[in-house]
Amino acid sequence: MLLDASASRLVVIDVQSRLLAAVQGGERVAARCAILAKGASLLGVPVCATEQNPAGIGGTVPELAALIGTVFPKTTFSAGGDPAFAAWAEAGGTVVLCGTEAHVCVLQTALDLRRRGRPVAVVADAVGSRDAADREAALNRLRVHGVDIVTAEMVLFEWLGRYDRPEFRAVLPLIKALGPDAA
């Protein structure tokens, strides 16, 4: 099933400076999350972020925080443990997840949302973990439990749906920034 911008919500999970420093390819994950947030904004897709223990490990990285209006601080690893986030996520459509760590907060949020009957997609090239084996295990486990595993480029093209949309010219540079040599 293709992602539809009018029936999607983007969640940027725990892209926080102190956590990101320990994640393999953390800068690339943050850059791809930012590209997704920019694309979501251009295409009218609601965006939020979560922050695990922001008092202890800081808030969302500044370059990403500037793109996101709604932030849900959390104490549980699954964002679904927060009633305000759960209400936001359950407001409709496919919940598209990116961020860190793939095998902890992303995984637990995705499985929690699936348990509640929500369709979920995880952006494989926009999630990270401290260890590559943990990231791969998380993606494999998510796939088994009915979570769509997608890439940032797939998300943007599916949200666009067609090249003759007025937003295409604004989204195209974002897609190009995802190229193989991108951050």
Image: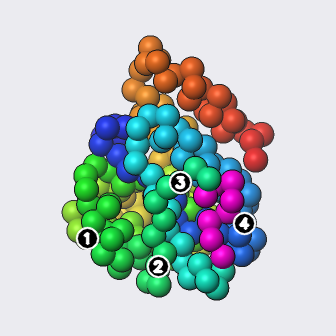
SS at mark 1? Answer: helix
Dot 2 or dot 3: first in sequence order is 3
Q: Quadrant of the N terminus?
A: top left
**Residue 83: percent from left, percent from top:** 30, 75
Q: Secondary structure at mark 4?
A: loop
Give the Cα distance between marks 4 and 2: 23 Å
Q: What label sits on residue 115 in the rendered view?
A: 1
* Amino acid type indicated by mark 1: Arg
Q: Disc 4 designates what residue?
A: 24
Task: Tell me which amino acid carries mark 2.
Answer: Lys
Marks 1/4: CA–CA distance: 29 Å
In the image, which residues are magenta?
58-65
Left/right placement of residue 164 relative to residue 124 reads left
Amino acid at the residue labelled 3: Ile
Residue 122 image point, x, y percent: 46, 56
> Which mark sits nearer the N-terminus, 2 or 1?
2
Whole-number angstrom distance, CA of label 3 to CA of label 1: 26 Å
Q: CA distance from mark 2 to mark 3?
A: 16 Å
Tag in front: 3 or 1: 3
Question: Does residue 179 lie above or below 66 as drawn?
Answer: above
Mark 2 element type: strand
> Could you say whether the residue bearing mark 3 is in a helix, strand or loop?
loop
Q: Residues within 10 Å of mark 2 (few under 14, many from 20)?
A: some
Asked if residue 91 lies left or right of residue 179, the reply is left
| Mark 1 / mark 4, whichever is N-terminal | 4
Q: What is the three-letter code of the residue carrying label 4?
A: Gln
- 125 or 42, nearer to the observer: 42
Residue name at image x 40 percent, y 48 percent? 46
Q: Is residue 79 left or right of residue 156?
A: left
Q: Residue at (46%, 60%) from the top-left corner?
A: 70
